[in-house]
Image (cartoon, grey):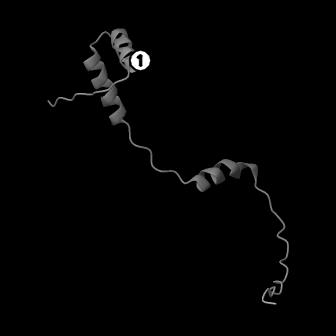
Amino acid sequence: MASMIIRNIDEQLKAQLRMRAAIHGRSMEDEARDILRAALATKPREPRNLAKAIRTRIAPTGGVTLQIPSREPIRERVDFSE
């Protein structure tokens, strides 16, 4: 088994770990191992496509059909050389 040292842990975080370990009736080291094991056992989330997520959420409302106005012709360029 490998060993690992974690430095510069915030005192409040250490106190929370101590309390959690006491609640579960085990040492802080064993509690930290269990937390790491549980965190790494979950599958990482795949990156989500924001546009697809919005469409999926809005789709049940039926959507809206918008009138697209016709475009005007391009204006003549202004000549600033004079």
In the rendered view, would you say 44 is above or below 11?
A: below
Pick whichever, 81 or 43, lies toward us: 81
How many numbered dots are placed on residues in this image? 1
Classify residue 74 by image quadrant. Answer: bottom right
Q: Residue furthest front?
A: 82
Name the residue located 76 percent from the left edge and 53 percent from the top edge. 62
**Mark 1: amino acid:** Gln
Crowding near pointer 1: few (<14 within 10 Å), some, many (20+)? few
Judged from the image, the secondary structure of the residue bearing numbered disc 1 is helix
> Percent from the top left, x then y, of residue 5?
22, 27
In the rendered view, would you say 43 is above or below 20?
A: below
Classify residue 28 by image quadrant. Answer: top left
Pick whichever, 74 or 28, lies toward us: 74
Q: Which residue is mark 1?
A: 12
Name the residue located 28 percent from the left edge and 12 percent from the top edge. 26
Which corner quadrant holds the N terminus?
A: top left
Q: Residue furthest left?
A: 1
